[in-house]
Image (cartoon, helix red, strand yellow):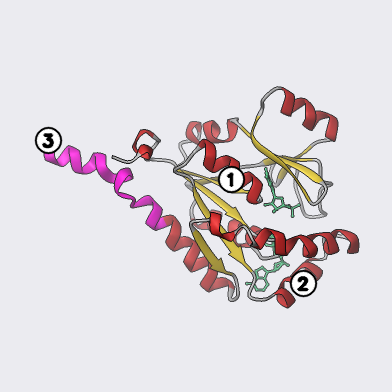
Amino acid sequence: MSASVSTDPDLILLIISSPSGAGKTTLTHRLLQEFPELRFSVSHTTRRPRANEVDGQDYHFIDEQTFEQLVDEGSFAEWAEVHGNLYGTSVTEIDRARADGKHGVLFDVDYQGARQIKEKFPEAVGVFILPPSMNELRRRLDSRGSDDAESRRKRFQKAREEIEHYPFFDYMIVNDELQQALAELRGIVLAEGCRQWRVAAKAEALLER
Ligand code: ADP
Ligand code: 5GP
């Protein structure tokens, strides 16, 4: 039996990472519309909200002092500095999903966060989203219109470093044509729900009859 049998078969932990601008927020929002049984893990961040972002929905926007206090109190399952801002996942995110009767939690975190989540929950599934090309990544960062030039430059410069971490992930999706990328992401979620260890109890129940 694998070690993950002791984990919750009814809760998929889905980590989605990518270089900034590759399209993970777009894909994540579409996936959540299709799968209401998935819950988005709302991170805490010291980054300023973008014009279209809602506090408590996209992120919990907090200042550095509050963030550091939460770190000291052990409130984060993982946290990291990304593009000069602090980001962290609260330990209560998974409990909340269970309490809400959800069957999955979706973590939008960078590779450092992905590693920390996997260390704590080895059954978590890591998906890395790639842009079709670096030129297209730059175009998407510029066209999003939500970050200033300095912030876009930093994000583009970090893209290479982030892509270098791809071998850590279980799945990779090239987000070229959005519908195709979404179909692949949907396929991953459906397949993960069919893992033998998740469905094993149903087989055992049949065998007991
Ligand atoms: P991330 O969350 O990875 O930083 P976003 O989801 O914000 O990236 O996407 C960055 C920009 O690229 C947005 O303007 C979004 O509308 C656009 N975008 C996302 N996916 C595609 C795609 N497949 N084709 C063209 N544009 C896309
Ligand atoms: P953005 O500022 O564009 O929303 O996110 C910047 C980066 O921070 C992205 O790579 C995103 O995945 C990552 N990120 C968002 N929330 C968290 C978090 O809670 N923890 C970690 N480690 N990274 C996060």
Q: Nearer the viewer, residue 36 or 186?
A: 186
Considering the numbered disc 2 on the image, is that residue within a helix, a strand or a loop?
helix
Q: Which residue is mark 3?
A: 208
Q: Which circle marks residue 159 in the picture?
A: none
Q: Residue 136 magenta-drawn?
A: no
Q: Is residue 98 left or right of residue 202?
A: right
Tell whether 62 sits left or right of 209. Answer: right
Q: Horizontal and vertical percent for residue 84?
A: 83, 48
Sequence-first disc among 3 and 2: 2
Total labels: the figure holds 3
| Residue drawn at 58 percent across, 54 percent down | 16
Which residue is at a point 52% across and 73% down the rendered structure image?
180
Dot 1 or dot 3, earlier in sequence: 1
Which amino acid type corresponds to the residue marked 3 in the rendered image? Answer: Glu
Q: Earlier in the sequence, mark 1 or mark 2?
A: 1
Left or right: 31 in relation to 18:
left
Residue drawn at (49%, 38%) of the image: 121
Residue 61 visible, this angle: yes
Q: Main secondary structure of the magenta part?
A: helix
Within-10-Å neighbours for mark 1: few <14, some 14–19, many 20+: some
Q: Is residue 151 above or below residue 76?
A: below
Which residue is label 2 attached to? 138
Q: Look at discs 1 and 3 and give the one toward the viewer.
A: 1
- Residue found at x 58% / y 72%: 178
Spatial separation of the CA atoms under disc 1 and disc 3? 39 Å
Q: Which mark is residue 115?
A: 1
Amino acid carrying label 2: it is Arg
* Residues rendered magenta in the picture: 190-209
